[in-house]
Amino acid sequence: MRLLYSKRETTYYAGDITKSGSNAEYQLVDERIVGRKPRNLSWAEAAAMPLTLLTVWELFFDRIRINESDSGRSLLIIGGAGGVGSIAIQIAKRIDGLTVIATASRTESAEWCKQQGADFVVNHQNLVEEVQQAGFRQVDFIVDFVNVNMYWDAMVTLVKPQGQIGSISDPVESVNLRALKGKSVSFHWELMFTRSMFQTEDMSRQHHILKQAAALFESGTITSTINQCLSEFSTENLKRAHGLLESGKSIGKIVIEY
């Protein structure tokens, strides 16, 4: 779990990839990347959120730099039902005021995306056709939470001139950035661990994001995306949780509570 108890406050955080993580009994965490746990969330609900929330927040506001003037513009989220995609839908819709198109291929994952606030849900297997059939010839922003290589050509086709694309996935082949030149499209990588890994000057930014998000959870603007909680931290549950993630069919966030 990504929770820490102190004398003053219960906190939540996503941690540092260069240090022991949530499979360890104890964790050492820099205070600059820790925030106050939302008071209205359970331990499990809160533990589900920091990693994905920080990822989306940084991608939207620090990389792509979406702002108030973008309200009403269109956003395509590839991988809408996953842990990152779920909170991305909420932030894009409830905070940014964007028109959200999310990908999902199964009935249950499509319904989950709609519950998070997606305006349109399309099948990723025929992405260009599906998006255009939904009424969008091209979109302003595209974020990839699945596989940048698999969807690269579709993203190049669907992004508007002077639009922006962001991704968190790890390409196994080269990405042809030159394909974006004609449209003057910007491309952004996001890794939530960059700030802690390199001890950047703005490392405390994550503390402030988590603090701001806590207020949003408490006001009901955004909600935890936990969808499954496994009781007892055991080898069996650890394997089960990893298996669900590796299946590519998990919905929302999975938490092991003990």
Image (cartoon, rainbow, N blue to C red):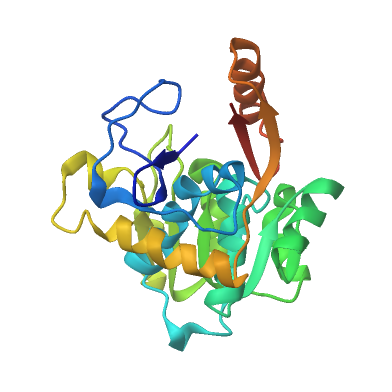
Residue 230 screen position, x and y as percent: 68, 28
Q: Residue furthest bottom?
A: 69
Query: Could you tell whether 65 is left or right of 127 in the image?
Result: left
Left or right of 81? Residue 206 is left
Total marks placed? 0
Residue 80 is at least partly visible in this image: yes
Q: Going by the image, does 122 lie left or right of 253?
A: right
Say which quarter of the image contains residue 102.
bottom right
Task: State the residue at coordinates (40%, 43%).
Answer: 14
Residue 28, placed above or below residue 63: above
Q: Nearer the viewer, residue 53 or 8?
A: 8
Residue at the extreme front of the image, as rendered = 7
| Quarter of the image where one finds residue 223 | bottom right
Q: Please name whichever residue, 143 or 160, is drawn nearer the observer in this view of the structure.
A: 143
Give how far across and how far down residue 222 sits, in percent: 60, 66
Above/below status of 28 relative to 201: above
